[in-house]
Amino acid sequence: MKHLFTSLLLLFAVNAMAQLGRPVRFDSIQYVTPQSLAKGNDEPSYFGDGRTGGINNGKRTTLTVEGVVCPMHPGYYGLSLSRRSTMVFSKDGAGRWSGLEVMADPGPVGSKDLATLKAVTKFYENFQPGLTVKFQGELGDYQGNTQLYLKEVETEVTNLTKTEITPYVIEIDSFKNGAGEDQYVTGEPYEQVYVEFKNVTVVNREEWSAGRWNWSVKNANGITIDIRDYSGYYRGDGAGIEKGYEIPNQSTWEPPAEGTVLDFIRGVIVQDTRAGYQLAPLVPEDLGLGSVVPAIISNASASPLVPTASDDITVSATIIDDVSVKAANVKYAVGINSTDWKTVAMSKVNGDEWQATVPKQADDSFVKIYIEAEDNEGNMSYGPDQSGMKLMVHVLNGGLRKISQIQMTPNPNGASIYDGKTLEGIVLNAVVTATVNYLGITVIQDSNDPGSAIFIKGQAGDGLSQLKRGDLLTITKASVEEINSVTHLSNIEFTKADGNGLPPAIMNVPIDSFQGQNPFAEGFEGMFMQWDNMVVADTAPDFPGYYGEFTFAKDVNSGTPQMRVDDFSPFIEQNFANDSLKPEQSLGFIKGIMFYSFGNWKLLPRDKNDIDGYHTRYPESVAEINKNINLQAYPNPTTGMLRVRFDAKPTDKSRISIVDLTGKTVYSENVSGGSTQIDLTSLNNGIYYLKIDTDSYSTAFPVSKH
């Protein structure tokens, strides 16, 4: 009987090997030569996009891999509910080229949906922390991160004895230099490897959205690296966590106080198009608090937001400690690159509230400001960050009068210095270059100088749907929001007048200006732009996934920079690129609004009239289409279920989509007839667009999730 049982196990193992194939070594998957890394090329040779021929020659490679699941179960992945992810490490332990991100994402592999993909692969059942698993997927990347997309093939647990991978102790200097630049040669071998930094200090701590934090750690040499909230354990907004994997007290999570010295912090190294290398802690145990826990500085502010040369600047903050706060100071320096920090002592004005006054400064000065606090044990803390950028003010005698004064920023991440603030008493005179009716979002521009355009986030009843291109707006009040790395105005108060037409398009900027982390591109965010004499380069740049995008370039030679184009406009059907365009097709011109989304700069044509050779015939407004088809979407606002009804021809094929303000399609389905129900429960609260594509028309309608 024992012999029979052993034989059955051997047979099972042979069958599994036959199904999944022999696993590829981790160091073979990720390896890039030092010569390539020195040139800034960090793509492994296994990469491909799934096709042969054309400008993107090379198939996306299918690999079988065997490794140890990291300490985080994929149910705790924190970045999206439409896909799930975890990390897997080499059985040989942490070290160079020993990690890999494994993702269940139905788009790249053509799976029906996430639930089907998870069920077939047994992703949740088998990818338990510490287990050794064999699996098969297609190798790709996103924003520089190598990712293996699981195919619809059942995974196999090959060792039920849990293995603990010890993190590889390394210095931050391997990934960043003093200027914050990525160090590819020494850093790339540790992409997605479990590493540990010892004796580092928390810096640059800022809540950029409710429950989500930007924060970094620095070593004794002052070299910093950003922390990424890849894991749901490290974000406090509750998003990204699905039912059954709730985290107790997650809504109250926040990083340690700035100035806290950590005995260690562990995690995997990931990449971001703008921030470069980052550390992603996986579980609470990855954070080792030391004995130095200083006072916490919060609610820091500088007033007035836009001072004149006659105004002193009042700096306020809440400062608390477990025992007592001994002293607090305001540090300020005049000039973006100044290191001449001056000190003003703060006074306790009410309970835990502290305040100080920075003396008036000259017109057009940038004043960097931060706060330092000392607790009863002499421990120091700093807030919001020691760069002084987060509390920076710009002295303007005339007040805010140009969009570029909001957009042009010294912050390396492109965020406005007014992010999260409400500006009153401003006077912005700008032309409407795109409208919510024809692009799905309103854009205004006041000149062709860098930073002279901005997006406007819509709200119910704000009047934006009544605007047309060329209208002149005068905005007197607005809030500033960074939404997925793009600056928006919201809650605007404005008056409207007839304008004198659109500004001329900015012509033929070199496309390579928009590749990678080029700060030059930031000045074109929201600008009306045009390229002449281009060719279609790729009609499905995300193949085998398809998101309605295409690329154009000067030619189709290998290595020629390509610009992405998004089907953001309701007048550009989702299948336009596949159905109407061909690779190497000539485009006499293509124009639209410049946008940043999912790690790429993209051009947003406002309709097909912005693309040479194509024409959009539409009524006076989208509202007229919606009236003609009797479109109903209710309840609106909704807390979850949205019912949609509209008139459709019996022969029409209809596709319903929900699109967020970044242009990402968060839901889509094909429907027959003119009615459906959409469950929005899992989406974050906010404004979305219901997009309807039929054989007869395309339209969009704003909906609000509360």
Image: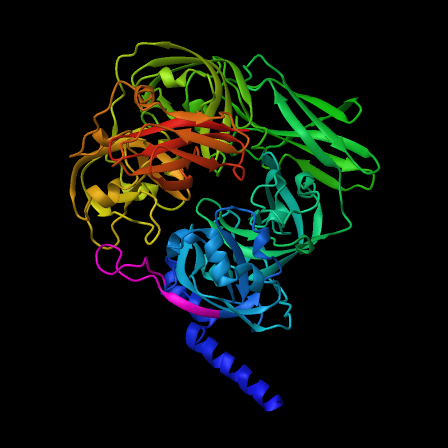
- Residue 546 rendering spot, x and y as whole percentages: 33, 48
- Tell me which segment is drawn in magenta: 47-65
Give left or right: position of 577 versus 308: left
Q: Is residue 452 visible?
A: no
**152 over 381 or under it: above or below:** below
Q: Picture quarter containing residue 70?
A: bottom right
**In which quadrant of the rendered image does the C terminus lie?**
top right
Q: Is residue 356 magenta?
A: no
Q: Nearer the viewer, residue 317 or 148?
A: 148
- Residue 26 rendering spot, x and y as whole percentages: 47, 69
By what rule are the colours in the image chosen? Answer: rainbow
Q: Residue at the location (59% across, 60% down)? A: 195
Q: How many marks?
A: 0
Q: Is residue 544 visible?
A: yes
Q: Nearer the viewer, residue 4 or 67?
A: 4
Residue sitting farthest toward the front:
650
**684 over 633 or under it: above or below:** below
Q: Picture quarter containing residue 94?
A: bottom right
- Residue 670 rendering spot, x and y as whole percentages: 35, 41
**In which quadrant of the rendered image does the N terminus lie?**
bottom right
Q: Nearer the viewer, residue 391 or 666?
A: 666
- Residue 581 rendering spot, x and y as whole percentages: 20, 43
Give left or right: position of 657 versus 16: left
Give left or right: position of 196 versus 109: right
Give left or right: position of 294 versus 424: right
Instruction: Name the main secondary structure of what is drawn in magenta.
Output: loop
